[in-house]
Image: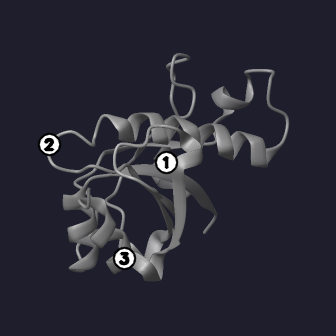
Amino acid sequence: MPLARIYLPLTSADLADLAEGRPVGPAPLAAHAVTPLLGRTGLVVDEEELEHAAWLAATREASGLTQGGAVRRVIAAADVDVALVLHPTDPDVPSRVTVAAPIERRRVVSFHIDEHAGDTEPTDLLWYDVTELADVRDLVDTP
């Protein structure tokens, strides 16, 4: 089965679900990915730059999720079946996709979390392997 890399903004409740063996959901889930619409911008030419653009869009969206308790943005990078990823038609958010199934922990490959509470720049996010979920959870609500 071909896979698509998606970037999914998460809440602390989503992290708790993953830690307890439950998937992030319910579907449909809003995420970001490389899409045909994203590639039409004319400014980006290779896959790595397109993935970075999708990741940046996810970091911007995650900023809205830090209200209500969480003090750090968290993005999960996950590989899901391409058949579950519905591409956007909105040119205002060309990386926006809808994932038609909950995301299981086995699909997550990494987490990206703010180095410090309240950070807002994409360069402030640190990379964590999926095996470091406990560390990510410890950081999420730490001021």
In the visual, does 3 lie left or right of 13? right
Query: Mark 2 sits on what residue?
Result: 68
Amino acid residing under circle 2: Gly
Q: Answer few, some or many: residues within 10 Å of disc 3's Cα (few below 14, many 20 plus, some between 14 and 19).
A: few
131 to 98, vertically: above or below: below
Q: Earlier in the sequence, mark 2 or mark 1?
A: 2
Comparing marks 1 and 3, which lies closer to the viewer?
3
Alpha carbons under labels 1 and 3: distance apart: 29 Å
Say which quarter of the image contains residue 15.
bottom left
Q: Nearer the viewer, mark 2 or mark 1?
A: 2
Q: Quadrant of the N terminus?
A: bottom right
Q: Residue at x 50, y 19 (%)?
A: 90
- Which is nearer the N-term, disc 2 or disc 3? 2
Tell me the amino acid under the disc marked 1.
Val
76 or 86: which is nearer to us?
76
Q: Which mark is residue 135?
A: 3
Q: Amino acid at mark 3?
A: Asp
**SS of the residue under disc 3:** helix
- On the rendered structure, is 83 left or right of 106? right
Crowding near the residue tagged with mark 1, few <14, some 14–19, many ≥20 C-alpha atoms within 10 Å? many
Q: Nearer the viewer, residue 135 or 133?
A: 135
- Residue where numbered disc 1 is placed: 85
Instruction: Write the residue at 26% across / 53% down.
Output: 11
